[in-house]
Amino acid sequence: MELTLIVFLNLMSDKFCELKSQNMDTVKAVAVSLSHVQDKYGGRATRRVIIDTPLIGSLAVASAATKCPQHL
C-alpha cells in the first residue's frame, strides 16, 4: 500500500494518542510516532509526504485533536 497523506496522518495520530495515553511527553510521542510510520513505509515515502504537504503540522494537530483531544 502506498503512503498517502491520509494514511500518514492516521498512523501518526493513532500512535501519538497511544503513547500520550502512556504518559510519554509530546516531543517523544511525535518522534516515536514518526519512526513508526518510517518503519512501516520507509524513510523516503515518509519524507515525500512531509515535504510535499503544505501545513503538515496543522493537519497533524487537527488529526490528533479529533482522536485524543485530551492530550493536546
Image (cartoon, rainbow, N blue to C red):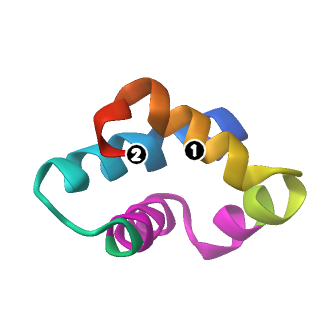
Choose between 65 and 8: the one closer to the eye.
65
**Which residue range is magenta in the image?**
29-47
Q: Which of marks 2 and 1 is in front?
A: 2
- Residue 46 lies, in percent from the top left, at 65, 63
Question: Residue 29 has which mark?
Answer: none
In the figure, is residue 29 to the left or right of 3? left
In the figure, is residue 63 to the left or right of 13? right
| Residue 4 in sight here | no
Residue pointed to by mark 2: 72
Choose between 6 and 29: the one closer to the eye.
29
- Magenta stretch encompasses residue 43: yes
Choose between 34 and 24: the one closer to the eye.
24
Choose between 13 and 1: the one closer to the eye.
13
In the figure, is residue 29 to the left or right of 34? left
Query: Residue at left 61%, top 74%?
Result: 43
Residue pointed to by mark 1: 61
Amino acid bearing label 2: Leu
User: Residue at the top extreme?
Assistant: 66
- Residue 7 lies, in percent from the top left, at 57, 37
Q: Helix, strand, or loop for circle 1?
A: helix
Query: Residue at left 47%, top 33%?
Result: 65
Query: Residue at left 47%, top 59%?
Result: 37
Amino acid bearing label 1: Val
- Residue 47 lies, in percent from the top left, at 72, 69
Q: Helix, strand, or loop for circle 2?
A: loop
Q: Calculate the distance from the C-alpha at mark 2 to the C-alpha at mark 1.
A: 8 Å
- Magenta stretch encompasses residue 36: yes
| Classed neighbour count for the residue bearing mark 1: other residues with Cα under 10 Å, few (<14), some (14–19), many (≥20) | some
Query: Residue at left 82%, top 50%?
Result: 55
Q: Do the residues labelled 2 and 1 touch (CB within 8 Å)?
A: yes
